[in-house]
């Protein structure tokens, strides 16, 4: 059985490593989440399938296409992992459209609410505004360099402060909870039907 | 191999499938992604196998409706179609390790230029709630009981569920267009950097 506390700590460590290796919040948070779970014997997808997903998530980094205005990439990557663990595929949706609410609630009631609580919003700019009181346009080379400089100066690229690491840690905890006590279609029909 | 006729047909097919999927699969992120990938497959471009596509579908369901149907994150149609574009850029974990962090900008560029900026141009934003406000003059919190049905009713009244008007169809169409161009005329990082510097 997976050790939840150990797994959360490991996810944060991996995320901090991946942040400076892959340089992208969505793909790094997702990879750290899945790799930490795998070390505990929880394999959501094969390594090959994970690498395919990695390719798709790059473009969701930095508030989508590094534009800042959309969902924080650390949130997108971890929400993707949580949704994946929810197991609602095409077949399930065709059987009953309400199945989608299992994934919606698994994401919204966990990492979604956590981001709202911690940062006051879901968007990349909500996070940077909340944490640093500043917005940077990552497509502007001067602003981008300034962001990187401030990030390092504040010691953000470490497992206990980095948004990517924190998100990966929260996500593995939520995924283990979801796998242990899954939401059901009947519950969703009662709540959202 | 390429012809503009086929490209236009593929874009149109992605738009049609997106509308169809909004009825059968219900949800902007997985719907726009599936429509993009399925349309391209019909025209001989297989980004992933149907089995891997379904795994990705599972991950994208929860990103629908501005994430978890919370409406305040990226519009699911932007997310699903951006995911497809990024996937087509084929920047693997291994490639990133071998060729460095700069490679990710190929995906950023194609997502921003091919999908996200087109949403901003048309709707003023890539955020779910902002797009609803632009189209309907009102926006809904789908997690408040009754508001999700109200949103669907509003979309129906505005005749949104057509290949030319549906936001999800726009996302799928723009993604199919960008991926078609990338496959038939690939651009490397040097080109992306020079394009950005213009």
Image (spheres, coloured by chain):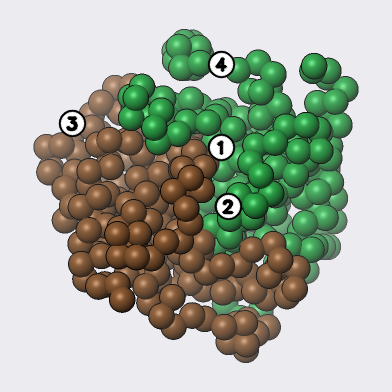
**In the image, B136: left or right of B86?**
right
Return the mark for residue B187: 4
- Residue at 16% across / 48% down in the picture? A158
User: Given the image, what chain letter belongs to the residue carrying mark 1?
Assistant: B
Query: Residue B70's x, y, as percent?
Result: 52, 65
Dot 2 or dot 1, earlier in sequence: 2
Query: Residue B10's x, y, as percent?
Result: 81, 33
- Residue at 27% across / 57% down in the picture? A11
Q: Are marks 2 and 1 in contact (CB under 8 Å)?
A: yes
**In the image, B117: left or right of A166?**
right
Query: Residue A140's x, y, as percent?
Result: 37, 24
Which chain can be seen in green?
B
Q: Which residue is mark 3?
A: A149
Tell me the SS state at disc 3: helix
- Residue at 33% across / 30% down in the picture? B97
Q: Nearer the viewer, mark 3 or mark 4?
A: 4
Which chain can be seen in brown?
A
**In the image, B50: left or right of A33?**
right
Q: Nearer the viewer, mark 3 or mark 1?
A: 1
Return the mark for residue B165: none
- Residue at 62% across / 82% down in the picture? A185
Location of the N terminus of chain B (image quadrant): top right
């Amino acid at each position: 059985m997976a050790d939840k506390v150990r797994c959360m700590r490991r996810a944060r460590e991996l995320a901090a490593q991946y942040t400076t290796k892959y340089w992208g919040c969505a793909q790094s948070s997702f990879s750290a989440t899945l790799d930490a779970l795998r070390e505990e014997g929880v394999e959501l997808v094969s390594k090959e399938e994970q690498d395919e997903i990695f390719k798709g998530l790059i473009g969701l980094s930095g508030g989508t296409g590094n534009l800042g205005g959309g969902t924080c990439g650390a949130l997108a990557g971890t929400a993707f992992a949580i949704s994946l663990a929810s197991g609602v595929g095409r077949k399930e949706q065709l059987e009953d459209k309400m199945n989608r609410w299992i994934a919606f609630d698994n994401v919204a009631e966990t990492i979604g609410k956590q981001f709202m609580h911690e940062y006051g919003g879901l968007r990349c700019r909500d996070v940077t505004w909340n944490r640093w009181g500043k917005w940077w346009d990552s497509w502007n080379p001067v602003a981008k360099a300034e962001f990187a400089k401030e990030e390092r100066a504040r010691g953000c690229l470490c497992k206990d402060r980095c948004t990517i690491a924190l998100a990966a840690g929260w996500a593995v905890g939520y995924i283990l909870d979801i796998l242990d006590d899954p939401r059901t279609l009947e519950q969703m029909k009662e709540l959202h039907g | 191999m390429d012809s503009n006729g086929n490209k236009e047909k593929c874009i149109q097919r992605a738009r049609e499938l997106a509308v169809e999927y909004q009825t059968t699969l219900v949800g902007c992120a997985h719907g726009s992604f599936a429509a993009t990938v399925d349309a391209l497959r019909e025209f001989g471009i297989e980004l992933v196998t149907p089995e891997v596509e379904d795994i990705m579908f599972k991950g994208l369901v929860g990103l629908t409706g501005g994430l978890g149907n919370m409406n305040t994150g990226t519009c699911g149609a932007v997310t699903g179609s951006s995911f497809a574009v990024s996937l087509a850029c084929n920047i693997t974990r291994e490639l990133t390790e071998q060729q460095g962090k700069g490679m990710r900008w190929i995906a950023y560029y194609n997502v921003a230029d091919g999908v996200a900026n087109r949403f901003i141009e048309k709707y003023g934003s890539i955020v779910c709630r902002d797009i609803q406000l632009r189209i309907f003059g009102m926006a809904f919190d789908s997690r408040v009981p009754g508001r999700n049905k109200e949103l669907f009713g509003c979309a129906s009244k505005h005749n949104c569920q057509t290949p030319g008007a549906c936001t999800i169809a726009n996302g799928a169409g723009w993604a199919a267009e960008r991926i078609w161009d990338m496959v038939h005329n690939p651009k490397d990082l040097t080109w992306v950097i020079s394009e950005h510097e213009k």
